[in-house]
Amino acid sequence: MLFMFFLSLITLFIALITMFFASFLSMKLIYDQEKNSPFECGFDPISSSRLPFSLHFFLIAIIFLIFDIEIALLLPMVILYSSSIKIYWFLTSMIFIMILLFGLYYEWNQGMLNWS
């Protein structure tokens, strides 16, 4: 039992030393000019991270993700056509497509798709 305690203590000590050296070696004291320059998005990395952005752009991105997932759900329906009962497949796919069309109509009616 005492052997297990010492083994655990040595393992903990080695892990703490490794974490200390990793954090000490990863500190950057001199800022690199390339690291401080704006990158692809054009935002300054040193300034505040709370820059305002378009909420409408965020809504369009969410709508895109939702419809992208729905397309991924529609693709296996074609594969299931040959191995399922045709009337059940047709009813299931039509209900799913009607839900998608209703959602698209609702978003269009609410003006979420208008880029102004």
Image (cartoon, rainbow, N blue to C red):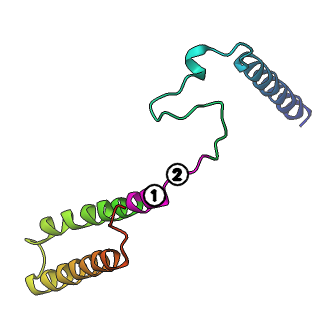
Which image quarter: residue 10?
top right
Q: At label 1, which amino acid type do we have? A: Phe
* Residue occupying the point 8% across, 82% down: 86
Q: CA distance from mark 1 to mark 2?
A: 8 Å
Counting labels gives 2
| Lower position in the chain sequence, tag 1 or tag 2 | 2
| Image coordinates for residue 81, horizontal then vertical, percent | 10, 72
Q: Which residue is mark 2?
A: 53
Provide the residue designation for mark 1: 58
- The span picked out in magenta is 51-61
Foreground of the two, 53 or 28: 53
Give above or below for 88 relative to 72: below
Q: Which mark is residue 20?
A: none
Confirm or deny contact between disc 1 and disc 2 (CB under 8 A).
yes
- Residue 36: % across, % down: 60, 22
Looking at the rendered structure, the secondary structure element under dot 1 is: helix
| Picture coordinates of residue 105, whole percent (x, y) | 27, 79
Magenta span contains residue 104: no
Q: Quadrant of residue 82?
A: bottom left
**Residue at left 29%, top 66%?**
70
Magenta region, main secondary structure: helix
Placement of 105 over or under 77, stated as above or below: below
Q: Is residue 66 left or right of residue 25?
A: left
Q: Amino acid at mark 2?
A: Phe
For the N terminus, which image quadrant? top right
